[in-house]
């Protein structure tokens, strides 16, 4: 098979052994360094992707991606607000919007005979919450019990453990920002509720959220009708929230319809999950980027070993380079010889590292179980793994680019060899 002379010689040099063995030693460890760096980067990034995916599922699966509020109050004499059903229908027709659910919320205190804790009280309509992550993570009872059992609530398992309550037990909800006059003076609004369900998601929501039926939540807040004052949007991807809000605001501004036309988007306001959870996910993203940087430095250090090995090869092959130049080999061909030799080492390291990294990422939990390593220190360890093809491709291409850049200086030094000076003493 025909090969350019520069590639042929470069491949021969990559297979040749140094008389002292030191150059071969440096070359071997540069290849191993790239292999370990690429494999580590693929494995760690896959674990970080898995953790990020779990956080998105556990936190953004329950935190509203977009909240719509400040829509007009219900008309006098009406039993429910006539605006939110038409507004919900309008929002469901927007791109990326999967579900729109009505709710009301207020800060509250929940008290049992064993403890007291502040929580966020949400009044929901269970018929709209069938796809909610809460509904699929119930460990006792059901979210549907809220509509069939009067003055009942659903709370997280962590909160239930703190209050030492179980299914069927009674707790007291107190609204410190709402008060009523009684014979004993002004008292905060409070009511006894029955525990109708317990959920477990594995996030801070388990310790901070309490759900009731919106009808009873409205009564507790001294509102008439269903008491709904907000809508929450769940999207196909939480990170599309700002895009959806921008589109809705643009549509809201372009309509410019007066209130009496019944435009459901008139005068409503929007907020996204970034306002409450944005700082947390920014920290997670920064941590992920720092892991990228630190592990990329491992690959960069390994590629510098290619520079060292090639510089020594250039010194070792001075006579051969001079002879080749005397026979008419161009300087660009000399450069191609040493780029080829360096890239062979880089290709071996990147290829083997990519294969080993993918195998490790896909079987990391099994491997750690076999060798008896438990990073959590208790229970059954299951690391979340999410192997992204784009990440693997980016890592491999980045390592190849760094390997290529590492060959440029030694290759250029080889091309500056002066045949007359080199061959004078041969």
Image (tube, grey):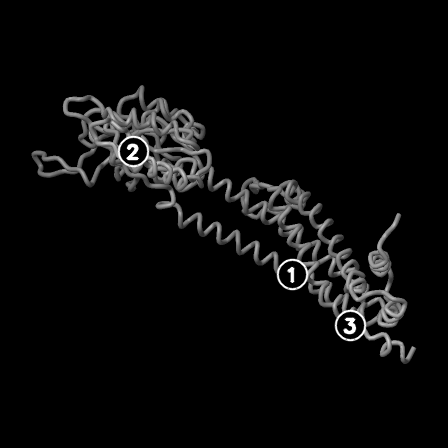
Tell me whether the residue at label 1 lies in contact with that at label 3, contact meaning CB atoms closer than 8 angstroms.
Answer: no
Residue 363 vertical position relative to residue 15 in the rendered view, above or below: above
Q: CA distance from mark 3 to mark 2?
A: 70 Å
Give coordinates of residue 300: x percent, y percent: 65, 61
* Residue nearer the viewer, 172 or 262: 262
Query: Quadrant of the rendered structure where residue 72 is?
Result: top left
Residue 238 percent across, percent down from the top left: 44, 39
Q: How many residues crowd around disc 1 within 10 Å: few (fewer than 14), some, or many (20 or more)?
A: some
Q: Is residue 226 above or below residue 351?
A: above
Label 1, label 3: how many angstroms apart (C-alpha)?
A: 26 Å
Q: Label 3 crowding class (10 Å Cα cut-off): few <14, some 14-19, many 20+?
A: few
Q: Residue at x 40, y 47 (%)?
A: 278
Q: Which residue is mark 3?
A: 416
Closer to the eye: label 1 or 3? 3
Residue linked to disc 2: 255
Comparing 103 with 213, the one in front is: 103
Which label sits on residue 300?
1
Q: Identify whether 7 is placed above or below 91.
A: below
Q: Position of residue 200 (x, y in %)?
A: 43, 34
Q: As rendered, which of 276 and 411 lies closer to the eye?
A: 411
The residue that appears at 76% across and 66% down in the rendered structure is: 411
Relative to 154, residue 396 above or below: below
């Amino acid at each position: 098979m025909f090969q350019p002379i520069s590639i042929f010689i470069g491949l021969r040099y990559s297979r040749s052994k140094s008389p002292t063995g030191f150059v071969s030693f440096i070359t071997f460890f540069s290849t191993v360094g790239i292999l370990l760096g690429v494999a580590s980067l693929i494995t760690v990034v896959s674990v970080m992707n898995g953790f990020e995916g779990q956080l998105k599922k556990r936190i953004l699966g329950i935190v509203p991606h977009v909240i719509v509020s400040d829509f007009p109050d219900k008309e006098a004499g009406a039993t429910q607000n006539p605006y939110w059903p038409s507004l919900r229908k309008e929002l469901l027709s927007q791109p990326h919007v999967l579900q729109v659910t009505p709710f009301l919320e207020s800060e509250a205190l929940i008290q049992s005979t064993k403890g007291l804790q502040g929580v966020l009280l949400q009044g929901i309509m269970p018929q709209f919450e069938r796809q909610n992550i809460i509904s699929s993570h119930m460990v006792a009872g059901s979210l549907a019990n809220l509509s069939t059992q009067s003055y009942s609530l659903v709370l997280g398992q962590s909160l239930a453990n703190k209050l030492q309550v179980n299914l069927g037990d009674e707790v007291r909800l107190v609204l410190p920002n709402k008060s009523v006059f009684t014979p004993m003076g002004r008292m905060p609004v409070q009511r006894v509720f029955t525990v109708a369900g317990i959920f477990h998601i594995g996030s801070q929501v388990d310790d901070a959220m309490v759900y009731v039926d919106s009808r009873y939540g409205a009564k507790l807040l001294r509102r008439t009708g269903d008491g709904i004052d907000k809508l929450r949007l769940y999207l196909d991807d939480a990170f599309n929230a700002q895009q959806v809000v921008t589109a809705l605001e643009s549509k809201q501004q372009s309509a410019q319809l007066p209130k009496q036309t019944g435009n459901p988007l008139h005068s409503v306001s929007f907020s996204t999950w970034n306002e409450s959870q944005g700082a947390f996910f920014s920290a997670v993203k920064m941590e992920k980027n720092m892991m990228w940087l630190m592990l990329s430095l491992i690959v960069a250090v390994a590629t510098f070993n290619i520079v060292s090995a090639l510089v020594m090869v250039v010194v070792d092959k001075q006579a051969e380079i001079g002879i080749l130049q005397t026979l008419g080999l161009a300087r660009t061909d000399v450069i191609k010889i040493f780029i080829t030799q360096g890239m062979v080492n880089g290709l071996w390291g990147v290829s083997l590292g990519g294969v080993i990294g993918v195998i490790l990422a896909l079987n990391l939990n099994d491997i750690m179980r076999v060798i008896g390593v438990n990073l959590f220190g208790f229970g059954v360890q299951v690391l979340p793994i999410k192997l992204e093809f784009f990440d693997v491709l980016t890592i491999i291409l980045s390592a190849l680019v760094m390997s290529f850049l590492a060959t440029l200086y030694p290759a250029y030094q080889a091309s500056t060899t002066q045949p007359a000076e080199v061959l004078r003493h041969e």
